[in-house]
Image: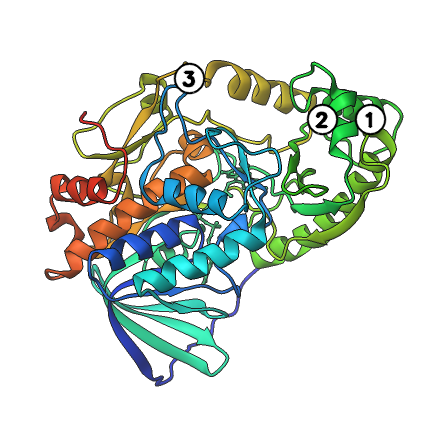
């Protein structure tokens, strides 16, 4: 199809000039804004939804992936602070304990309020309901970003930028190279997360007996498939998290074949995903003990997109680095979650390959982790832009590990420190010494062992 092109040109107000402009208010953007503001930079954080948290709140993703390596907590700094403060106010799941650092369920409403408080305390300026639509670029320098708000379009100028959009949108609009999908362009499928109310967790636990969490549900999924219950059978079933006394945060079902960086596909995908949720809701009520009286309370505002653009950075962290548990001279943190690439299609072959990777070859032993270099957060084609979170510089396999929220806190915090330090000079992020970034991170509680 040939796309007709039109020219877009108009004079708009430039409303604000800040040291650091962060676009995207998910875990990466929150950590970046907080760390930059705590270093004294003036920071604006722009978010298209009406709350902070990204997929963890607007997307109803129900919990944090592991934050420990089995021997110690390796997600320190802002990530740990979020969990500590959430725990203090009873915002983590009903089964949570003080020393639980693996799989921490949370209530999204508590998390939203906590994030509001944290950015308020740090003096971060926030704009909700405001969408990045364009950038002002001169050569390799981004000078400003253009937003669409309720009052119309306007610009914000900044010395440095953090792309925390999850989709690498700021970098992409600025002309930076991005990668997407595998060799065939295939992507992980999105999931529309939801909340079930009225769940009898004690009955559920009794039904599960000595099983690994999820094993009994998996057997029920296989049974239901055999009985022809599902219109689109899918053996990969992530499952339910206990986010409240009688609440379940649900990460179930996939909308295969959706590219989350394509508006038409995203629209069709969320419509299809709502039907998938209805079917899974009916499945739980019929097949899963403890869910007989459940009610579907909500589906998320955002479709849970796992993977779109990966921004090309100075160093693309790779599967090879994961396998080698590699350390880097400029590492800003370490992480250990297995490579978790949800199968692009609901075939048995794809599912078996996923199991072999996620439950097999990509699982680390206790005490093992990989380093994350600062260079993977520096956008290769630009001078004053950092990238963090699920769109940081990795190959496709590695993104299956770095995409989860604890790692997004790690990379966001480091991007924010580097951006603030660069903004103290002429904005050039490569001029900031990685040793200084590490020093800044350690002062704010981050775990950065020497390479
Ligand atoms: C279904 C699903 C289940 C998952 N399960 C887990 C799990 O169990 N545990 C875990 O730790 N992680 C999980 N993850 C991964 C994790 O939730 C995300 O990868 C993570 O939230 C990414 O963080 P981020 O800050 O990079 O981006 P996001 O959380 O996606 O945040 C990006 C933010 O940018 C905003 N934005 C985007 N474009 C614009 C724009 N143009 N203008 C303004 N704002 C914009 C978005 O509204 C959003 O708030 C899951 C992901 C999915 C999809």
The kind of secondary structure element at disc 1 is: helix
Q: In 3D space, how far apart are the residues under numbered discs 2 and 3 (Cα atoms)?
A: 24 Å
Q: Nearer the viewer, residue 323 or 108?
A: 108
- Can the viewer see residue 293? yes
Which label sits in the foreground, 1 or 3? 3
Image quarter hosting the N terminus:
bottom right
Q: In 3D space, how far apart are the residues under numbered discs 1 and 3 (Cα atoms)?
A: 32 Å
Q: Residues within 10 Å of mark 3 (few under 14, many from 20)?
A: some
Residue drawn where x is 37% and y is 29% of the image? 73
The answer to whether 56 is drawn above or below residue 427 in the figure is: above
The kind of secondary structure element at disc 3 is: loop
Q: In 3D space, how far apart are the residues under numbered discs 1 and 2 (Cα atoms)?
A: 8 Å
Quarter occupied by residue 334: top left
The reply to whether the C-beta atoms of the residues labelled 1 and 2 are less than 8 Å apart is yes
Mark 1 sits near ligand 1, with its Cβ under 8 Å away? no
Residue 25 x, y percent position in the rendering: 43, 57
The kind of secondary structure element at disc 2 is: loop
Q: Which residue is mark 2?
A: 235
Residue 377 x, y percent position in the rendering: 28, 44
Q: What is the number of the mark on residue 225?
A: 1
Image quarter hosting the C terminus:
top left
């Amino acid at each position: 199809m040939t796309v007709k092109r039109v020219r877009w040109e108009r004079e708009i107000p430039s409303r604000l000039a800040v040291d650091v402009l962060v676009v995207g208010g998910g875990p990466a953007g929150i950590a970046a804004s907080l760390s930059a503001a705590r270093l004294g930079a003036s920071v604006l954080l722009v978010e298209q939804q009406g709350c902070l948290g990204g997929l963890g709140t607007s997307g109803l993703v129900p919990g944090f992936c592991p934050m420990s390596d089995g021997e110690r907590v390796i997600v320190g700094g802002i990530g740990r602070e979020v969990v500590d403060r959430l725990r203090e106010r009873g915002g983590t799941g009903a089964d949570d304990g003080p020393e639980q650092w693996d799989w921490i369920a949370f209530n999204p409403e508590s998390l939203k309020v906590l994030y509001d408080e944290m950015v308020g305390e740090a003096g971060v300026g926030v704009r909700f309901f405001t969408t990045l639509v364009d950038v002002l670029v001169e050569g390799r320098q981004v000078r400003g970003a253009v937003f669409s708000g309720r009052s119309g379009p306007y610009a914000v100028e900044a010395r440095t930028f953090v792309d925390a959009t999850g989709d690498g949108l700021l970098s992409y609009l600025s002309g930076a190279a991005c990668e997407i999908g595998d060799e065939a362009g295939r992507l992980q499928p999105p999931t529309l997360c939801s909340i079930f109310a009225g769940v009898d967790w004690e009955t559920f636990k009794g039904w599960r007996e000595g099983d690994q969490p999820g094993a009994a549900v998996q057997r029920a999924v296989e049974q239901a498939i055999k009985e022809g219950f599902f219109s689109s059978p899918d053996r990969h079933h992530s499952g339910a998290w206990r986010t409240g006394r009688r609440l379940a945060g649900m990460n179930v079902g996939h909308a295969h074949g959706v590219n989350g960086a394509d508006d038409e596909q995203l629209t069709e995908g969320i419509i299809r995903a709502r039907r998938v949720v209805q079917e899974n809701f009916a499945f739980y009520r019929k097949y899963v003990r403890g869910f007989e009286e459940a009610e579907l309370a909500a589906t998320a505002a955002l479709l849970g997109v796992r993977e779109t653009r990966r921004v090309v950075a100075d160093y693309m962290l790779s599967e090879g680095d994961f396998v080698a548990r590699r350390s880097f001279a400029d590492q800003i943190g370490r992480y250990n979650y297995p490579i978790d690439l949800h199968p692009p299609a609901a075939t048995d072959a794809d599912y078996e390959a996923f199991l072999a990777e996620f439950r097999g070859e990509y699982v680390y032993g206790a005490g093992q982790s990989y380093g994350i270099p600062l260079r993977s957060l520096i956008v290769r084609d630009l001078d004053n832009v950092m990238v963090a979170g699920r769109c940081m510089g990795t190959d496709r396999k590695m993104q299956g590990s770095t995409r989860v929220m604890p790692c997004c806190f790690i990379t966001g915090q480091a991007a924010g420190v580097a951006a603030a330090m660069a903004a103290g000079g002429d904005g050039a992020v490569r001029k900031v010494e990685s040793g200084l970034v590490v020093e800044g991170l350690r002062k704010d509680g981050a775990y950065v062992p020497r390479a």
